[in-house]
């Protein structure tokens, strides 16, 4: 369980770095794309230094697909945030953990006990409650908007599933190569999109993205080790709920944000969900 706890910790800190950048008014795609470039570069340098810079074909394909999905999810989410209530967007983004959980049961035959099923169901309910912002009660109208929210759910869920597939593709010993290709692919495509939009990056955005990239290279390695040891039916609900619980607590005590009653109730439900899922 130590890898589960460490995964929660590194993911939570990762979220706080981005929250700080958001408060500075930084352009999220620039920060994220720079992060991916540094992830790919730093892991490439590590592989060269350890004389392991050989990428198996399966790792190359997995990394390319994962990188494309990562950057597509990022672009779609940031674009949709300009048109839809943030509460709705973040809710479907967080609840996308249901995708790798369902695939884990149906495709990879991952174990799930009746109590865990209840915990997973409560986790999804809790995520919806905890990520509901002040604008969450605005009605999202139109099939196009509903389609965008569904696409975010599926793309982010596919991102999680791509990382989960590394273990079942027999690539546990090559996960660093997978992450290198993933970061390089996502960073290249992300910066191509920024260049296309003619967005001029700020020095602070590049500095924060670089810092997060070095941190994320380590954090992703921790997560990949955890996924090689734990079933997704345990990892995703526990990490997803735990990070959002900690994020809500940090929002209240550190960022001085006021939590609504629904978010507070969601923290209670999430605590119960984590207990049942474990």
Image (tube, rainbow, N blue to C red):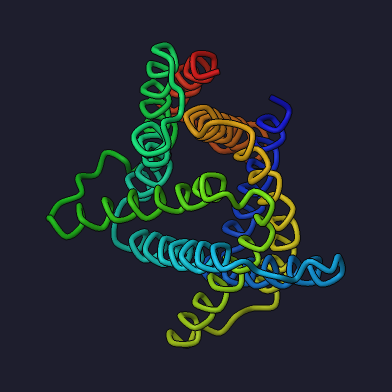
The N terminus - image quarter: top right
> Does 131 appear above or below 71?
above
> Does 111 appear above or below 51?
above
The C terminus - image quarter: top right
- Residue appearing at x 57%, y 49% in the figure: 170
Is residue 190 rendered to the left or right of residue 75?
right
- The percent position of residue 78, horizontal first and vertical second, equals 42, 63
Q: Quadrant of residue 94?
A: top left
> Does 75 appear above or below 257?
below
Is residue 109 rendered to the left or right of residue 199?
left
- Residue appearing at x 34%, y 48% in the figure: 153
- The percent position of residue 222, horizontal first and vertical second, equals 70, 44
- The percent position of residue 194, horizontal first and vertical second, equals 49, 81
Count of all numbered marks drawn on residues in the image? 0
Whether residue 6 is visible = yes
145, 220: nearer the viewer:
220
Whether residue 26 is visible = no
């Amino acid at each position: 369980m130590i890898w589960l706890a460490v995964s929660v910790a590194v993911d939570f800190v990762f979220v706080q770095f981005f929250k700080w950048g958001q408060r500075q008014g930084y352009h999220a795609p620039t920060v994220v794309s720079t992060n991916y470039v540094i992830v790919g570069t730093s892991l490439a340098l590590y592989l060269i230094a350890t004389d392991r810079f050989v990428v198996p074909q399966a790792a190359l394909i997995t990394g390319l697909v994962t990188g494309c999905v990562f950057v597509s999810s990022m672009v779609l989410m940031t674009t949709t945030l300009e048109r839809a209530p943030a509460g709705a967007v973040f809710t479907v983004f967080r609840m996308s953990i249901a995708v790798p959980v369902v695939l884990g049961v149906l495709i990879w035959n991952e174990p799930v006990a009746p109590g865990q099923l209840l915990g997973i169901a409560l986790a999804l309910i809790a995520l919806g409650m905890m990520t509901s912002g002040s604008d969450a009660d605005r009605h999202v109208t139109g099939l196009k908007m509903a389609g965008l929210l569904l696409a975010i759910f599926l793309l982010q869920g596919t991102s999680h599933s791509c990382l989960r597939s590394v273990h079942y593709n027999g690539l546990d010993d090559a996960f660093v190569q997978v992450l290198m290709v993933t970061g390089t692919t996502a960073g290249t495509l992300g910066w191509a999109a920024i260049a296309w939009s003619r967005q001029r990056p700020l020095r602070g955005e590049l500095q924060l993205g670089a810092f997060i990239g070095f941190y994320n290279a380590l954090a992703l390695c921790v997560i990949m080790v955890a996924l090689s040891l734990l079933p997704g039916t345990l990892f995703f609900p526990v990490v997803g709920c735990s990070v959002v619980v900690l994020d809500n607590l940090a929002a209240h005590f550190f960022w001085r944000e006021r939590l609504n009653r629904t978010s507070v109730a969601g923290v209670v439900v999430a605590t119960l969900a984590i207990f049942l899922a474990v």
